[in-house]
Image (cartoon, grey):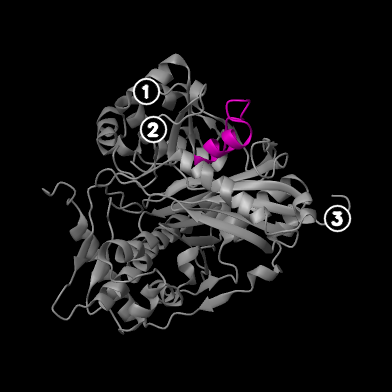
Amino acid sequence: MGEGASYIGAIDQGTTSTRFMLYNDKAQIIASHQVEFTQIMPEAGWVEHDPMEILETVNVCIDKTLKQVSPEVVAGLKAIGITNQRETTVVWSKSTGQPLHNAIVWMDVRSASICRRLESELDGGSKHFVQSAGLPISTYFSATKLLWLMESIPSVREAVDKGDALFGTIDTWLIWNLTGGVDGGVHVTDCSNAARTLLMDLRTLQWHEPTLKSLGIPEAILPRIISNSEIIGEISRDWPAAGVPLAGCLGDQHAACLGQQCKEGEAKSTYGTGCFILLNTGDEIIPSSHGLLTTIGFKLGPNAPTNYALEGSIAIAGAAVQWLRDNLEIISKASESETLAASVENTGGLYFVPAFGGLFAPWWRDDARGVLVGISRYTTKAHIARATLESMCFQARAVLTAMRADMKSRLQGVADEEFLLRVDGGASANNLLMQLQADILGVPVVRPADNETTALGAAYAAGLAVGVWSEQQIFEDNHQFSQPKKFIPKVDEETRERRYKSWNRAVERSFGLADLAL
């Protein structure tokens, strides 16, 4: 790389906040800045973001971070990577650069009626796209959100018909704007984000023409699909870090998988707004028969092999703690959930199923709604807090049980070895939550010293593309950041299985509640 130290930046655009992280060539964070942005909820089950506000948070975060370091460090910035909330859908005008509607967020369920219509019209019902995309028909994925915009928002329909519309997930929106916008912005998405639209063929990593035809989506509005690690373009002069290459892009869960150095047969669980568990299946596409998603792991270069993954997506994890804080107001900040939950030894027989907008893997029930089961006069806010933490753990167990069942017959020996779950994300800093997770799973839970591995994965991808790191260096096991804390199960098998059975009874009671009269 020539003389002087090298630095890599990472834009981490999440569901509730945006961050910019600056790393040195030892993958250590030397500066960062974070900004939260507005959650827009026009109706029950609807969640939106303002795309222009997201752009502003990116601008502020890069600017504030670079002002924390010396001019020599800024001059040594070799590349920037992007990681983002997946599935969230934006449509904007190619000629004006303005969004034609707020972004529809991944957890939004407004396209439920479109999903039911597609299931009735298409062969195979909800599984019609599983063979090509690895995904069931669901409100979760971008295609159904795009269809809602095309069918419900006249300005979107008009722009599509006139050839003035561009579609993208948040990565595409950011890249297009960062590289010039209306003045030559690059309209691309990476294969991990494209894999979450319902529209990409997992085998070719290109848009699946029969799917586009069946849904009436013109390919002209779609971005070009690229790998996770390659030079995309330079940041334009209107932004901080102008002239620096954008050189990596991954959806947030895929970035965390890379940041956790997950090799074939290894899994990670990221605890954020939702909880997302990915298991690297190597170069093999493994269809799930247990309610999981078949998706991309990562592809580290245009000519690199594709790593595939099984994924279990849990819609509500940390968002349930936010609900305790913002809606019930039984805590004033998220970190208080640990202290409050630890003030009682158990939940007092209380089980919480946080199906605020349905349940994702492995149930895929958009008719489910949240339930608290087992309430008595003995129940206190501490029991509710503990049941909230346990709800994340029980959902993760359901996903990992499905994963091991899918993998057992495919990768001999992997599922029979002692299983270590790598964890990361903001909520993984909660020690009680991680101990509960180990207890409910019955396997060790391993948390790296730096639990913010999502941004690290984006930095790795960008650094790899410009030669700061080699792939061998990325996957070696002696990184300073990776010194882990291990949580060992403390609950006996009989208790663990009895409580998991009770949790599943609570889950069954959440089904079919979406149509309750208000």
Q: Is residue 104 magenta?
A: no
Task: Please give the residue where the numbered disc 2 appears in the rendered image.
Answer: 101
Q: Is residue 177 left or right of 200 when viewed as pictured? A: right
213 in relation to 280, above or below = above
Sequence-first tag of 3 and 1: 3
Q: Amino acid at mark 3?
A: Gly
Answer few, some or many: residues within 10 Å of disc 3's Cα (few below 14, many 20 plus, some between 14 and 19).
Answer: few
Residue behind mark 3: 4
Q: Could you say which is closer to the camera, residue 45 or residue 208? A: 45
User: Is residue 171 one of those drawn in magenta?
Assistant: yes
Could you tell me how far apart the alpha carbons at marks 3 and 2 are, in whole angstroms? 45 Å
Task: For marks 2 and 1, give the CA distance.
Answer: 9 Å
Q: Are marks 2 and 1 in contact (CB under 8 Å)?
A: yes
Circle 1 Cα neighbour tier, 10 Å, few/some/many (<14 / 14–19 / ≥20): some
Q: Which residue is mark 1?
A: 155
Q: Which residues are magenta?
A: 170-190
Q: Position of residue 99 (x, y in %)?
A: 45, 31
**Is the residue 466 above or below the residue 479 in the image?**
above
Q: Residue at x 38, y 18 (%)?
A: 158
Disc 2 packing (10 Å; few <14; some 14–19; many ≥20)? some
